[in-house]
Image: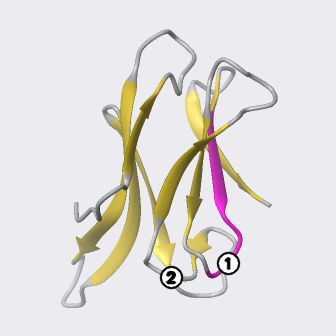
Amino acid sequence: MLEKPGSSIIGNFKCDGQIRDAHIGLVAISPTHETFVRARLEIGNESLEWQIGGDRQDAFCGSDLTLSAIPNPERPMCPALKIDDGMCDAFFMGWDDAKKAFTWTRN
């Protein structure tokens, strides 16, 4: 995974008392003869990926991604993550206890 400086942070993102590293970066995917780039978020040993480009709600507009921890109003002891490409709405990521998975929303 290709990361730019300042693209990683640490925190108790699952609200389980364990501090984990979170990294945002780019990965190259070559399923056929074409290669394309996806955004990838790694939190501990878990990862999520999104497309870059296109007019989809589940894709970033650009590849210059920044990652930051923000207050989580629903769970003040567990920070949420904000991923921003500076071009379209940011993604907000948080731990969902019921689903036992990280889930994302956009503003």
Confirm or deny contact between disc 1 and disc 2 (CB under 8 A). Answer: yes
Q: Is residue 17 left or right of residue 72?
A: left
The residue lying at 65 percent from left, 20 percent from top is: 97
Residue 44, position as x, y percentages in the image: 34, 32
Q: Earlier in the sequence, mark 1 or mark 2?
A: 2
The residue carrying pointer 2 sits among few (fewer than 14), some (14 to 19) or many (20 or more) residues within 10 Å by Cα, namely some
The image quadrant of residue 43 is: top left
Q: Is residue 4 left or right of residue 83?
A: left
Indicate the secondary structure of the residue bearing disc 1.
Answer: loop
The residue carrying pointer 1 sits among few (fewer than 14), some (14 to 19) or many (20 or more) residues within 10 Å by Cα, namely some
Q: Answer whether residue 88 is magenta in the image.
A: yes
Residue 94, position as x, y percentages in the image: 63, 37
Mark 1 = which residue?
Answer: 88
Q: What's the CA distance linking mark 1 and mark 2?
A: 8 Å
Quadrant location of the N terminus? bottom left
Amino acid on which the number 1 mark rests in the picture: Cys
Mark 2 = which residue?
Answer: 62
The residue lying at 55 percent from left, 31 percent from top is: 101
Give the camera-side residue of 15 and 77.
Answer: 77
The residue lying at 53 percent from left, 27 percent from top is: 13
Residue stretch rendered in magenta on the structure? 87-94
The image quadrant of residue 90 is: bottom right
Give the camera-side residue of 17 and 70.
Answer: 70
Quadrant location of the C terminus? bottom right
The image quadrant of residue 61 is: bottom right
Q: Answer whether residue 53 is magenta in the image.
A: no
Amino acid on which the number 2 mark rests in the picture: Gly
Indicate the secondary structure of the residue bearing disc 2.
Answer: loop
State whether residue 60 is above or below residue 42: below
State whether residue 100 is above or below residue 49: above
